[in-house]
């Protein structure tokens, strides 16, 4: 290429390093090339970064690009600081290049300027010769920023580039007035360096804004950047999918209707930008509403609407409490400001599952020991769109066995048949309340009644009348007395029989005070129960710590054997204390089918009145790094109930079922397993309740890992008082991939 060619002379210094940047001594601007009458050359030759007392030589090239011969000559520079060879007349043939050396000999640190006149075909042309001092120079692209239209309180951003085309490193400082800002405001720009800046425009009013940004650099030199922008009010239209609007308030209505807790409903909200510029938006609940207490979720809560475009935003209805009506309000605002475009009113009602049972009480009648009797129950799901999971809370060692203990009921009147098998082994009456836990529904309590006879015992055959009388006695706190004491009070006239044959107290203050004293001493917690299946969850949750029963109290109902190392011993024991709260002798029988891992001794014993009896729970694991669990089921009944010939009808007392949970593991030290589990929701919200009212919520815990999971709920309060929240079951064992349904109840104060 034609142009300035540097002579390779050892006496010259063609390159010089300044501020760690290598720079050429000559200004080689490609735009300085020019063609005169077919001769291509440079129109200027500028020396930079030179040192006084040195000599520098550059070569100007003249190339004939035309298709004919050209006459060429020149004049020497006028000053002695620029020198060249003696002039002569030349004829340049086509394609021929002539090299003309220019020597620069500076003596002082000042600027030198001269001219070189050349004649091409007798036409004069001028080439500038200069030896310049280091200078501060900047190049700006673009030299003007136009932001156009911008929504008020929105931010528009433009970028521009600033290059240091000078010979010195320089500091950069930008100054501009609102609503314009430039970032970064300050920086250091090296020689040849390029810096990208961003300019923001955020108008606060609908006005035309014209400004100038000044750049101070070098020796307080100033470079200006012109800025233009127009602020305008945005225009957004908000519509629901059915275009419903409240005529009184103008709110946009999004109505989900009724939805089951396991269902999913979606609605859509459409935002239309009628403006000719983009508009950022933000959807947020109105102030004063707790974020966790909303059941509506927007698929997008903020974004940008481009000019004359629209966006569709899905809305999900995800209620956190069943049988509740939800109504929430949301503002559609501009993202940076407080301009409310519209108010969206979302409403919907959550509906719990509706599982019904064919029989609320199953009576097996009289059954011989070690024989089997079957009964059938059916569960119905009357909700068409509901999918309900259920779980029957029972024990594998129970004399009552269910053919199906958990499953799913699809909606549309689906039905599930379950076979209940009763296999008693000990002669006594059996009465058990089995909770059927259902997602998003109060538990169904199924009463199971049976009587076992053998050669050694023939207790009274339990029937509906005996059960009703016993519940009346429990509500009157008379179940704490054996029938011998009750018979004595009947003879004395302190107790009488009501029309149904149940015992009730008279107005005799002596007996009433005696009963109240005993009640206070032993803290009876069982509430009056006229119909436990009407308020079923109240009956099951009547005991806050699960250790109090009608006849007895237990020192603990959950025993944990943690990190039992088999290399030390093969047996671990814990103690259980059972206290008789009644004035009569009780018999406690534990129903145990398999005692190889967990066992309890004694399995049958007599409990003296108002006395405590100790039991030993033994854990004998066999495999290392394994989880074990066991659910013991026991029955407590009055000793005088062993023969029906000895008991009058009013003296028949039901047995009381008690439960124990044993959990153990043989995990070695540093061999702990990290459980993986998931709740169906991370927060439980109870609706407002009044006095003497309780509310429930269900919680499903799923074991998502590959190892068994053991859980236990610990309820505490901030002021160390008794918590009003309780969980059932409060502890348990979940197999990999399995789940358990937990009922959480807010008990009334």
Image (tube, rainbow, N blue to C red):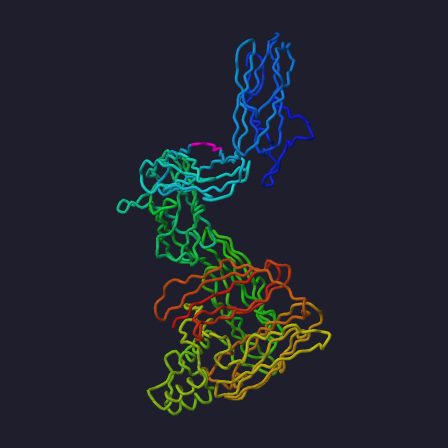
- Front residue of this view, candidates 474 and 415: 474
Q: Quadrant of the C terminus?
A: bottom left
Name the quadrant containing residue 239.
Answer: top left
- Image position of 305 (left or right of 428): left
Residue 555 place in picture, x, y as percent: 54, 80
Name the quadrant containing residue 42.
Answer: top right
Residue that appears at 57% across and 26% down: 81
- Front residue of this view, candidates 725 and 695: 725
Residue that appears at 39% across and 43% down: 281
The magenta segment? 139-143
Residue 398 place in picture, x, y as percent: 58, 72
Instruction: Identify the main secondary structure in magenta.
Output: strand
Name the quadrant containing residue 442.
Answer: bottom left
Is 141 colored magenta in this rendering? yes
Is 493 colored magenta in this rendering? no
Residue that appears at 67% across and 69% down: 667
- Image position of 474 (left or right of 31): left
Figure check: 208 above or below 722: above
Figure check: 52 above or below 186: above
Residue that appears at 67% across and 67% down: 670
- Image position of 166 (left or right of 258): right
């Amino acid at each position: 290429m034609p142009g300035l060619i540097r002579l390779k002379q050892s006496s010259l210094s063609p390159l010089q390093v300044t501020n760690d940047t290598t720079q050429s001594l000559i200004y080689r601007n490609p735009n300085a090339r020019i063609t005169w009458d077919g001769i291509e050359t440079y129109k200027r030759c500028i020396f930079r970064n030179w040192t006084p007392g040195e000599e520098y030589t550059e070569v100007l090239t003249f190339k004939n690009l035309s298709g004919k011969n050209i006459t060429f000559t020149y004049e020497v520079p006028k000053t002695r600081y620029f020198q060249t060879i003696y002039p002569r007349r030349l004829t340049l043939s086509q394609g021929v290049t002539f090299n003309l050396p220019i020597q620069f000999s500076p003596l002082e640190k000042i600027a030198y300027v001269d001219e070189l006149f050349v004649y091409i075909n007798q036409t004069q042309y001028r080439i500038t010769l200069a030896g310049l001092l280091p200078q501060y120079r900047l190049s700006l692209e673009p030299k003007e920023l136009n932001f156009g239209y911008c929504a008020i309180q929105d931010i528009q951003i433009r970028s521009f580039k600033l290059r240091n085309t000078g010979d010195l490193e320089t500091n950069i400082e930008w100054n501009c007035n609102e609503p314009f800002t430039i970032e970064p405001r300050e920086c250091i720009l090296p020689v040849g360096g390029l810096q990208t800046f961003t300019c923001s425009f955020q108008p606060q009013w609908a006005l035309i804004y014209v400004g100038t940004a000044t750049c101070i650099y070098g020796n307080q030199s100033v470079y200006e950047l012109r800025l233009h922008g127009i602020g305008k009010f945005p225009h957004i239209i908000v519509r629901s999918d059915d275009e419903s609007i409240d005529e009184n308030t103008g709110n946009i209505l999004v109505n989900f209707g009724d939805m089951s807790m396991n269902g999913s409903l979606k609605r859509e909200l459409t935002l239309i930008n009628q403006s000719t510029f983009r508009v950022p938006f933000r959807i947020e609940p109105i102030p004063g509403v707790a974020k966790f207490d909303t059941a509506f979720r927007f698929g997008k809560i903020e974004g940008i609407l481009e000019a004359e475009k629209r966006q569709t935003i899905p809305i999900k209805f995800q209620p956190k409490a069943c049988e509740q009506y939800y109504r929430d309000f949301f503002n559609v605002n501009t993202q940076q400001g407080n301009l409310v475009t519209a108010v969206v009113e979302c409403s919907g009602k959550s509906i719990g599952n509706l599982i019904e049972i064919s029989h609320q009480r199953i009576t097996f009648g009289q059954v011989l020991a070690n024989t089997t009797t079957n009964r059938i129950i059916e569960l119905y799901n009357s909700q068409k769109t509901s999918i309900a999971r259920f779980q029957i809370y029972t024990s594998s060692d129970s004399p009552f066995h269910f053919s199906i203990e958990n499953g799913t009921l699809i909606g549309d009147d689906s039905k599930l048949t379950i076979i209940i098998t009763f296999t008693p082994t000990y002669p006594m009456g059996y009465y058990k309340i089995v909770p059927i836990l259902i997602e998003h529904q109060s538990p169904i309590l199924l009463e199971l009644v049976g009587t076992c006879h053998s050669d050694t015992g023939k207790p009274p055959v339990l029937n509906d009348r005996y059960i009703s009388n016993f519940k009346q006695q429990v509500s009157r706190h008379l179940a704490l007395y054996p029938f011998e004491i009750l018979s004595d009070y009947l003879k004395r006239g302190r107790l009488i029989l009501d029309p149904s044959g149940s015992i009730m107290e008279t107005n005799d203050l002596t007996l009433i005070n005696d009963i109240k004293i005993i009640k206070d001493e032993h803290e009876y917690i069982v509430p009056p129960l006229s119909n436990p299946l009407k308020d079923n969850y109240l009956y099951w949750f009547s005991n806050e710590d699960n250790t109090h029963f009608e006849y007895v109290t237990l020192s603990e109902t959950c025993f944990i054997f943690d990190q039992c190392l088999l290399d030390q011993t093969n047996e671990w024991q814990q103690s259980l204390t059972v206290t008789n709260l009644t004035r009569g002798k009780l018999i406690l029988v534990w129903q145990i089918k398999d005692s190889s891992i967990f066992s309890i001794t004694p399995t049958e014993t007599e409990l003296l009145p108002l006395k405590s009896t100790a039991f030993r729970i033994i854990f004998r694991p066999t495999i290392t790094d394994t989880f074990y669990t066991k659910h013991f089921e026991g029955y407590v009944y009055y000793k005088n109930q062993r023969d029906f010939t000895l008991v009058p009808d009013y003296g028949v007392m039901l047995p009381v079922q008690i439960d124990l949970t044993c959990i153990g593991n043989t995990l070695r030290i540093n061999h702990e397993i990290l459980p993986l589990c998931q709740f169906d929701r991370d927060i439980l919200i109870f609706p407002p309740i009044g006095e003497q009212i309780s509310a429930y919520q269900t919680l499903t815990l799923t074991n998502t890992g590959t190892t068994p999971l053991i859980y236990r709920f610990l309820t505490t309060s901030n002021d160390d008082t008794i918590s009003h929240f309780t969980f059932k079951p409060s502890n348990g064992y979940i197999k990999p991939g399995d789940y358990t349904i937990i009922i959480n109840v807010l008990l009334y104060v």
